[in-house]
Image: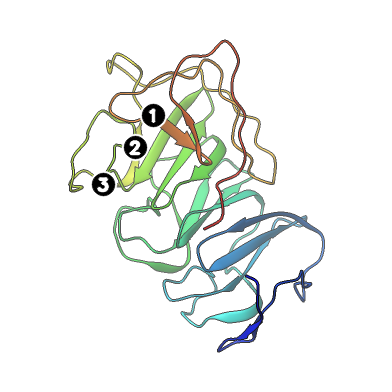
Amino acid sequence: QSARRSTAVGQTFDVLVVVQGLSSVIAIAAGDYDTCALSSDGTVSCWGNNTDGQLGNGTDNLSAAPVMVQGLSGVTAIVSGAYHTCALLSDGNVECWGRNSDGQLGNGDVNESDYPVAVQNLSDVTAISAGYWHTCAVVLGGTVDCWGDDTYGQLGNGVYAKPATNDSDIPVPVLNLSGTGPLTGVESEQQPSAETPEIANPVLLPFAALTLGGVCYAAKRRRSHRGARRPAS
């Protein structure tokens, strides 16, 4: 923004300001109106808007300073959608918090959560990525599961309906090109900064291309395309 203006919790600046109360940060993830930081000790702190519990601290009160996400430790990577955040844990499990209108938390319901909840039926995860209202995970062995909004076929499971009637509040497998089984051969090497996982032999998926971190793997290439993080809104 080109001008400084007052807000209910502080000011908006057109220059960089230091986030107070943070140290040893190794990764950040930003939603529409909130930001989260992963520290080297495996904990996560968030700040900003909290109308949907996206700060994960057990309240819906916004915060102009970082607050610790409740009950979360051993985090190796974080990603954010529009109003939700997910964390990959060192044991290969995933926990998410925030808005859940489309099942993007993956915990089997569509109720928002102001604290982390475990994604159901998912383990041995090696990388995660979040779209606006959906989330995907690369699983050990090279398959991909996605959950949440499926209005445009984001889940890659061969089902497409608009308006959305096929959202999923639990992970579903992304299908291969022929639609006869799960997509396989996906390789990931996720850094704490949650860069887009590198995909070997990306393929065109039924009804929707697999989107990880804002990069659309829409056709088979001789080289994998490694992209940038999801653009900030």
- Residue in the foreground of this view, choosing between 58 and 81: 81
Q: Which residue is mark 3?
A: 167
Query: Residue 108's x, y, as percent?
Result: 31, 52
Disc on res. 123: none
Q: Amino acid at mark 2?
A: Leu
- Side of 205 where 12 appears, left or right: right
Q: Amino acid at mark 1?
A: Ala
User: In the structure shown, which secondary structural element does the residue marked by tag 2 occupy?
Assistant: loop
Q: Is residue 158 left or right of residue 125?
A: left
Which residue corresponds to mark 2? 155
Residue 28 locus on image (x, y percent): 67, 56
Disc number placed over residue 209 in the picture, else none: 1
Q: Is residue 198 above or below residue 61?
A: above
Where disc 1 sits, the SS reads loop
Q: Nearer the viewer, residue 228 or 34?
A: 228
Which quadrant holds the N terminus?
bottom right
Q: Earlier in the sequence, mark 1 or mark 3?
A: 3
Above or below for 141 versus 228: above
Mark 2 in CB contact with mark 1 (< 8 angstroms): no
Front one among 16 and 117: 16
